[in-house]
Amino acid sequence: MRIAVSSQNFKTITGHAGKSRRFMIYDLEPGSEPVEVERLDLPKELSLHEYHGPDHPLYQRQLTHILTGGAGDLFIERMARQDISVISTSETDISAALSAIANGQALPPAAPHEH
């Protein structure tokens, strides 16, 4: 799996993935430790909320999932069109969340998304 984590501070999972401009990219295999492979620090005009082109930098990273603290239905649908699944959680610890995913454990759900 290749997972992008929305993290505005590059320390914790943060919400509103559509407006996020910072992502940490991890490779993750079941039962293994996550490996950080890249960090993206995008300009405001490249947040997914602002940019609607087919060549967004996240789409070029062979992602299977986006892990976030919150995302709306339109964002989830948009990612599905790119074959990217969205995982929304209230967990803020990146290591704990990735470990749970690697071990097939459920994450606590995110709070309802509001604009």
Image: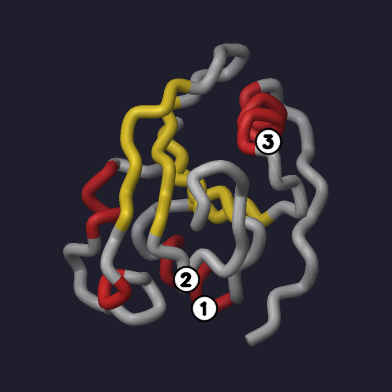
Position of residue 107 relative to residue 57, above or below, is: above
Whether pointer 1 and pointer 3 mark residues with C-beta atoms closer than 8 Å, the reply is no
Q: What is the crowding at mark 2: few (fewer than 14 residues within 10 Å), some, or many (at least 20)? A: many
Position of residue 39 relative to residue 80, above or below, is: above
Q: Which residue is mark 1?
A: 74
Numbered label attached to residue 97: 3
Which-is-in-front pick, marks 2 and 1?
Answer: 2
Numbered label attached to residue 88: none
Position of residue 106 relative to residue 48, above or below, is: above
Residue at 27% over, 68% down: 43
Residue at 75% over, 46% down: 91
Amino acid type of the residue that numbered disc 1 sits on in the rendered structure: Leu
Residue in front for this viewpoint, 92 or 62: 92
Q: What is the crowding at mark 1: few (fewer than 14 residues within 10 Å), some, or many (at least 20)? A: few
Amino acid type of the residue that numbered disc 3 sits on in the rendered structure: Ala
Outermost residue, bottom side? 115
Amino acid type of the residue that numbered disc 2 sits on in the rendered structure: Gly
Whether pointer 2 and pointer 1 mark residues with C-beta atoms closer than 8 Å, the reply is yes
Residue in front for this viewpoint, 29 or 35: 35
Q: Which residue is mark 2?
A: 18
Q: Position of residue 18 (x, y in %)?
A: 47, 71
State the SS at label 1. Answer: helix
State the separation of the CA atoms marked 1 and 3: 23 Å
Q: Position of residue 21 (x, y in %)?
A: 39, 63
Residue at 63% over, 29% down: 95
Residue at 22% over, 49% down: 60
The reply to whether residue 77 is visible in this rendering is no
Q: Quadrant of the C terminus?
A: bottom right
Which-is-in-front pick, marks 1 and 3?
Answer: 3
Asked which quadrant contains residue 98, the reply is top right
Quick check: 92 left or right of 37? Answer: right
Circle nearer the N terminus (1, 3): 1
